[in-house]
Image (cartoon, helix red, strand yellow):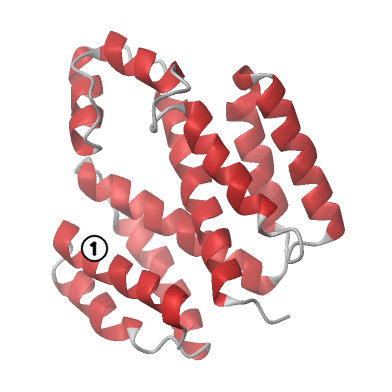
Amino acid sequence: MIILNSNAQNIYWVGRYLSRIQYLCGQFPFRTDEEAVQYAHAFCLPAFNASSLNELTLNPEQPASFHQQFQSVTHNIQDLRGVLSIKAYGELKQMINTANEHAGYICSVVDECSEVLEAENEDIFLFFSLGQLFENLDRQIRLSQDFTQSIQSLSGLIEMLKLKGWDSLDEAWQHLLEHPNSNSFYQLNDQVQYLFEVGV
């Protein structure tokens, strides 16, 4: 199965948003002002304590809220109707409808969505995993968390992408390995976005 760059990018962003929501679900509700301020500062969110950050994540008008981020998942999956298997698309659509009708189900639905996508074909799994790992690495760098496992997992995906012709990632990848910081990560991220837009 040949996946268009635009579809690969949709899959990648589904991976990123699902991972973003999953992590937020694990932290919510924020209980201490210290952890809330750290999170808000890392992601440039207008919150100054645990209470304001919890309110923000529940406010459907806020871009960083559960609702808005899940809408991003929804839109990307809708664009993949002709790429995903009929069974997978049907299951995802049902889960999305459930979460849209009952916002409290979002945290359980995102885990189920991930399981469905991980069971799809190799190319879908590749770009979905790429999105997940990029999101995890981005968060880990922002929050000064250990990202050793993410780097190790990403190494294998980079090799798989190179086999598909994404050789131009190698320089940015090596730079990240030598200088594991936010600037190096964003350079690699920019290169991935460039390849999505123009191809190899």
Q: Position of residue 118 (x, y in %)?
A: 66, 57
Residue 181 appears anywhere in the view: no
Query: In the displayed structure, does residue 69 sit left or right of residue 142?
Result: right
- The answer to which image quadrant residue 33 occupies is top left
Q: Is residue 116 above or below residue 83?
A: above
Residue 44: x and y in percent read 21, 35
For this rendering, which residue is in front, 107 or 66? 66
Q: Quadrant of the N terminus?
A: bottom right
Total residue callouts:
1
Q: Position of residue 50 (x, y in %)?
A: 27, 13
Badge 1 marks a residue whose secondary structure is helix
Q: Is residue 111 above or below residue 4?
A: above
Residue located at (32% from left, 11% from top): 31
* Residue at screen point 85% across, 58% down: 86
Q: Amino acid at mark 1?
A: Tyr
The answer to which of 63 and 118 lies nearer the viewer is 63
Q: Which residue, given by chain and number where applicable, does mark 1 sit on? A: 186
